[in-house]
Each structure stands twice: as structure tokens, then as C-alpha cells.
Amino acid sequence: MTTKPMMPEREADLLRAPGNLPGHWSYSQLNTYETCPQMFYLERLMKEPPLTINGGGIGGTAGHRSVEICEAEKLWEDDSNIDLMGELFVANFREATRVEQEKHPDTPIRWGGRKTKNFPDGENEYWWEGPAGGPLMMKRYAARRRDWAEQGMSVIEGGTEMRVMTEVPYTVEEPQIVDGEAVMVEVAKSKPIIAYIDIVLLVRIGPNGIERGIADWKFGSLMSCKPRQMVVYSYALKQSHDWDITFGDIMWMRGKDVDTQVRRVEIPAELRDQVPAWYGEMAKSIDAGIFGPKPNTLCASCAVRDRCSWGRHISEKELSDE
């Protein structure tokens, strides 16, 4: 146990009300906090309603739901199902749009992507439902899925959209009275971590025999393809199932060829074992009330920028140039 004098007042006590901390950790929480602590505070702790609905998020939801159905029905096995898979995406896209609009009535959808002559608003619903959007991504998904089968890689039963929960240990500092003095004491804690893994497990023959891997489908921007996500998921599976996940495939369905669609991440055990330290650092920072803004290229598209101490000063010109 380590102790140090307690500060008379912490920013966390001023910023957040008791009970607002999440009951479990996830990869998206870690990613949000590292992207911008103030966005984490506003979205995750204070549950502020979004300024806009993320159109790309709707597309991602539709893509994942469509893949889940295609896996269950094995639609990817037959090329004659390509049109059906495209129609499935469109149906799921419309349903995801309806759900988001019901959840956030009177909130406009913000469409991202490059603005073109044909799509001056960016990648709107017509783009997502058109031949260059979701249906094309589903065609790419089927092609890559058949590649795995040809390479002898298989998916375990129940290994699609798999929910995994385990505990992640970490330490925080809490005020205590020690020898009659108020001090900050480092206390060991743990919290559940929940992961929803797209594909478990791909299997390959490596130098050490059979190796297990995971895959995650990406339908949004390249910025969403982060190797750290694969490492967090490998940690969760090691703790929950004692599986050594040695690689992860990030499947970016906007890529135009195999080399850009498949991004393989090798996951050594020593990197996987750092995951508790990542969440521990985040927990300490949250407990210390570190929620300052972290200006970056995503500020203009942030759904809570109007309540952010930095984002609310972004000019209309900056927004239109984004």
C-alpha cells in the first residue's frame, strides 16, 4: 500500500456526480477517453444527447448486423447470394436509421465522407444504399470470407458476434485515514470488461502448431482500424477462455483490394499482458478528474462539441471546411 497527502479538493468531485462511472469497461471507452477525455466525460458520464446522429455509425451497425445474418445462414458461400446480401444491408441500414431517429428525435443525421458532385452532402443514405456503398462492402465481405475457407481457416461454433466478459484488475487512489492523517491510498480493484467480437476464431497453422485469431469488420473510415482493439479482445479471450490469440485481422471493407482490405495484427503475449495497465491508467485519470479537451482532427464532427470548452469555439468556416 502506498500513501501520499490528500489534496483538499479534486476536479473529479466538481465535474461528475457520484454513480456516473460506467459499471464495466469496454474497448470503445478506452478509445474514447484517449481520443478526448472531455468527450468521454460528456458522452459516457454525463450522457449528453448528441448534437447530430453519426451517419457512419448507422452504416457500421447495418454492416455488422448483415454480416451476422450472412454467417448464420452461410450466404457468403454462394456467389448467387450477392444481390440478396446487398438487399439485406439496405434493409438493415433503414432499420438502424429508424432506431437512431427514434432514440434521438429531431436530431439531424451528420453524413461523413468525401463530398462529390453526385453526393454533395457526403456519404448520405443514397450512397450507403447504392452500388458503391453497403452492397459493395457486402460483396467484399463474401470474397474475403471465402478466402479464409480456401486457406483452411475456420470459425468456431458460436464464434460470430461473440460476447465475452471477464475482469480486468487495476489500481486507483482513494482517500483514507492512516495514523490519524488523511492520505491518498493506492487500492487494488477490478472491473468487468465486456467485448463483442465479430469473428472468433480464425485458425491457422503457424510455427508452433495451430494458432487462434480474431477478426473485426470495419465499414467506416480508416481511422477506425486500430490494432489496439485486437489486443484488448485477445486479453478478454485469454482471461475468459484461456485462449492464446496470436493474430487479429482488421477487415476494412472500403479497401479496393485484398492488400488494403485485410490488415493483420500480430499479438505477442507481452503486448496482450499490458491491457490491465492501459485500463488502470485510464481509471486513475478518471478518478483524478482529468477531463480536459484534447483538440484533434475529429473535433468538427464531435457530437458534443457544442458543450465542449474547446469545440464550442469552432467556427462555421472550420465546420464547412472539414
Image (tube, rainbow, N blue to C red):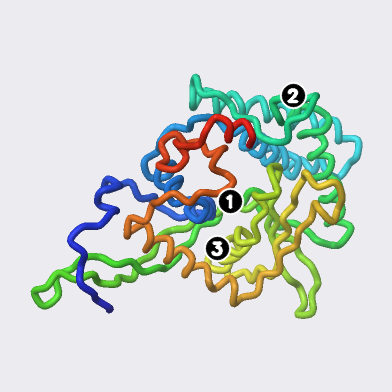
From the image, tell me which residue sits under label 2: 126
Around disc 3, counting alpha carbons within 10 Å, would you say few (fewer than 14), some (14 to 19), or many (20 or more)?
Answer: many
How far apart are the alpha carbons under marks 3 and 2? 38 Å
Secondary element under disc 2, as helix, strand or loop, is helix
For the question of whether residue 194 can be seen, the reply is no
From the image, tell me which residue sits under label 3: 236
Examine the rendered structure and indicate whether residue 21 appears above or below residue 211. above
Disc on the earlier residue, 1 or 2: 2
Q: In which quarter of the image is the N terminus?
A: bottom left
How far apart are the alpha carbons under marks 1 and 2? 29 Å
Disc on the earlier residue, 3 or 2: 2
Q: Do the residues labelled 1 and 3 touch (CB within 8 Å)?
A: no
From the image, tell me which residue sits under label 1: 196
Identified at 33% across, 59% down, the residue is 287
How far apart are the alpha carbons under marks 1 and 3? 10 Å
What's the amino acid at mark 3? Ala
